[in-house]
Image (tube, rainbow, N blue to C red):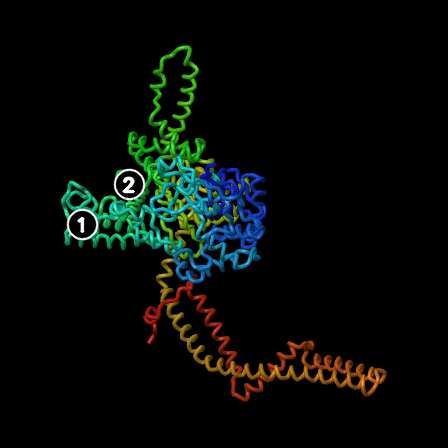
Amino acid sequence: MAAKLDESPIALALSVDHIASYCHNCLIKNDKLKKCSACRMIVYCSAECQKSDWKLHKPECSAIQKHDGVSDEGTRLVMRLGSLWARKEMGTTANETLDDPFSGRRLDTLESHYDSFQERANKWLGVFGEYGQWLSVYKEFCLKPIVDEEIVKRLFCICSVNSFSLTNQFGTTIGICLCLRLSAVDHSCKPTARLAFKGRTCLLVPSFPFASCITNLLSLNHSYIDELQPRAERQKQLKEMYNFTCECPGCIDEQRFLQMEGFACPECASPIAHTEGASCLNDNCAYRLAADHLEICTLALETAKAGNSSLKRKDLKNDVKKGLAEKLLTVYQNSLHELNIQRLPALRVLYETAIDEERLDEAETYGAKLLAIYSAFQGPDDLSLCHFKYGYAQVLKKQNRHAACKSLLGPVREIFGKTFGANSQIYTNVEIMLRGFSLSWFTLISYPIDQTNRQTRMRLEQRATALFREFSRLLSNGQPKLLRTIIPFPDCYASIRPSSSKNHTLSRNRLTQLYSVSTKKISDLSASHGHLTISFQHGLPILVVPLPSRTEPCQFSLRPISDTVGSFCEQLKIEDRGIDHVGLYMSDGARIASSTAIEHLLQFQTFRLRINDRHFNVEVAKLELDPISDRVRSVDDLRAVVAQLHGVLNVNEYKAERERRLQERLEKAEEELKPLQDQKTLIERECEAHSERVMIAGFAAMGIQTGIFARLTWWDFSWDIMEPITYFATFSTVIASCGYYLYTKQPFEYHQCRDRIFTRQFYKRAMKHNFNIIRYNELITEREEVQRLLGCIRDPLQLHLPVSYLSKYERI
């Protein structure tokens, strides 16, 4: 029996960005998903899916309700696996077969490197994030322990070694999952298969035509990391993350190494080794690497390593990255081979920037270079290569390069159809694009008409009409905005090492390498889910917005002067907690800044409102009265007058002078207060010890009294004699308590009695140590008053003026 190349994950967790877009059980995406009635965060497509997922969702459901928020997908995956572990549901127990030796794998038998966890903890800090920080986040989010901490640590190790990135059909990472069988597939830097997900099913898709007939999992392999990076970096990552030294065909093949990392021959531009005197791989070229050219190439290689590290930084602006990438490509000319993978980061940055800025000529040029590198080192059926071709074809289509676009999409359509099915969205997109290039209305009506093919002709005409309508809508409306959304290099493949971010996300180490476009298709940004209108009631703008979770319209009042776009978006999120993303965009796709005032927004006439994955066209109704009325103009005039008075009256100088004086008073008071505080602390320690001794003495006296009464009752006298004595002793205690109340005006309670002893002793010792209580209280009051005045003078952001600025206004 042949081994299956697919498997349903034992557990999965969606990322925070996609938590409201996919069913948590079957991963279906549509507009009819319903939220869990308890946590209002996790969504399902049906009651059956919710019931099936409840045993895993129950712990996180309580945690989400308690924290009013959801944690990262790594934490939730470990919680779900912990629920399975507590139920002793470890997965399959089938026996291993010759074709499928991994069928008997269980959750508790997966490789975790747990024995060497403590020794390797320091090395794992940069690979999986600091375990101590992750554990604190896990404990904070998880209300009550599901399993022991040792089991949590072991599950953390299992996920770090065996988990996969959960992707959709467009190659975008939407979460993290754990498969039992497919997690045992070996690694290779020259993979013969890729991981993909068709709904909830994880597929092992062959990357080469010869691998499509292989059914033994031992004969297939995929890459745990990004294989399109230098060999030294790949081996270092694999050693740190998986504790093995890679000796796969992709690492030991020297010719492949020279093509991926070789220098460029100055005569024929073929790859050449890194040693002096090395010969060119081109048999027709007799050049040998000279010392001066070796020095130039080595310098270019060092520059590439430093520059690529800078390009991966997220804090750099796009303009800086673009300039750096252009300079790097200039350095690479005549030094690094044209297929050298050191070129990839710079080409990716320039390609994405050109798409964002709609410079299609440059995007086509850089995309062709990227395609050449990917095609050289990846299989023709590689799914990641197909996703990149799909994105690049859209650039070519925009350039009216229909023939080149058709040649790219032809093989891609077949692979997408086999992998995701003919009913998948990505296959439909490719089919529509190809139909638009190949079908012609005139070729259809030029068919000979006879009685035998009349019905066939009518069906073809109807199908062609529907296809042309769909294709025309895509070309006319969606394509200009699609080009700004092409992201050929998703974050799931950008880096294997997770950053120590504030979310402490668990590492997704076995990454599916999909150089894909974004999930937004041609029709996504152009398709509208409705039209909204801003009307005016009594001069106030009113907008009625349909809320996604509550499925009901809600009316919002927009205040033109005081409200901004950001405050309006916050109002939407407060009204509906199911809104994860909301933004306002211009008609051309440019985002409207959050700081934009509502009065300026009303002047746009038309704009777009995005709520999660839904888009609405918003129109501003015409007014007989201008939104900026006379009242607004009078307010603007008043602002101008106040600003002029503010400058003429030297308010800033007065505030600085006032702050300087108050600061001097505060420093003087604190300087005088410091020795008094030290003295007060010493006296408090002595009084604390004295009150403690008095309370212990009282306790000892009551114990002695009890012992004396016991002695007199059972040894010296009888109970008949001692009963009235104990009565009068108890009544005397009550009288003493009443006298204490009459004297102190306080009830007789032990803690209040102790505080009174402490206070009386403090005043006595203060006189003994010459501690001025009155002066101490005056200084405390003065310090609080000065701090209050400083808070009133300083601006709302509590910005402290520098001393150099204050000294300018010091009066002599």
* Residue that extends furthest to the front in the rendered view of this protein: 98
Depth check: give the residue in front, 86 or 591: 86
Q: Badge 1 is on which residue?
A: 278
The tag earlier along the polypeptide, 1 or 2, is 1
Q: Position of residue 91 (x, y in %)?
A: 53, 46
Q: Position of residue 242 (x, y in %)?
A: 40, 53
Left or right, 258 with reference to 657: left
- For label 1, the SS is loop
Left or right, 735 with reference to 443: right
Crowding near the residue tagged with mark 2, few <14, some 14–19, many ≥20 C-alpha atoms within 10 Å = some
Residue type pointed to by label 1: Ala
Q: Relative to 161, is 645 above or below? A: below
Left or right, 3 with reference to 249: right
Q: Badge 2 is on which residue?
A: 376
Report if residue 543 is visible in the image.
no
Depth check: give the residue in front, 659 or 40: 40
- For label 2, the SS is helix
Depth check: give the residue in front, 662 or 242: 242
Residue type pointed to by label 2: Ala
What separation in Å lies between label 1 and label 2 (alpha carbons)? 23 Å
Report if residue 113 is visible in the image.
yes
Q: Position of residue 36 (x, y in %)?
A: 56, 45
